[in-house]
Image (spheres, rainbow, N blue to C red):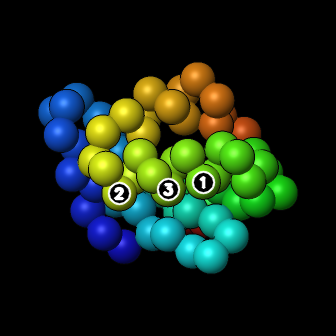
Amino acid sequence: MRDYQNLAGNSGIKAYEIRRNAIVIRFNGGATYLYDYDTPGRIHVDEMKRLAIGGRGLSTYIARFGGEYARKLD
């Protein structure tokens, strides 16, 4: 996993891993979730990937649009 840059300085996200059809996100509390093209869908996952790489806005985006995840990994 790659550390999330957290350029805004107040994110609840610690790290992420981009996969071909998914993104895995680890939150500061240690919970890790898989978001994929089935749930919450390709549009949301591709935007999460873009925000993760950019290091800003991912936590806010998940709170607004990506609360549904494919599965919890831990």
Label 3 SS: helix
State the residue lying farthest toward the top.
64
Q: Which residue is mark 1?
A: 46
Label 2 SS: helix
Q: Which residue is mark 2?
A: 53
Residue at 28% across, 55% down: 4
Disc 2 marks a residue whose amino acid type is Ile
Specify the quadrant that holds the N terminus: bottom left
| Residue 23 visible, this orientation | yes
Query: Mark 3 and 2 residues: CB-CB less than 8 Å, in contact?
Result: yes
Q: Nearer the viewer, residue 54 or 27?
A: 54
Disc 1 marks a residue whose amino acid type is Asp
State the residue lying farthest toward the right.
38
CA separation, marks 1 and 2? Answer: 11 Å
Q: Residues within 10 Å of mark 1 (few under 14, many from 20)?
A: some
Residue at 54% across, 35% down: 62
Q: Which mark is residue 49?
A: 3
Disc 3 marks a residue whose amino acid type is Lys
Residue at 41% across, 46% down: 51
Q: Residue 10's spot in the image, x, y percent? A: 22, 29
CA separation, marks 1 and 3? Answer: 5 Å
Query: Mark 1 and 3 residues: CB-CB less than 8 Å, in contact?
Result: yes
Q: Nearer the viewer, residue 14 or 5?
A: 5
Q: Residues within 10 Å of mark 3 (few under 14, many from 20)?
A: some
Number of disc labels: 3
Mark 1 / mark 2, whichever is N-terminal: 1
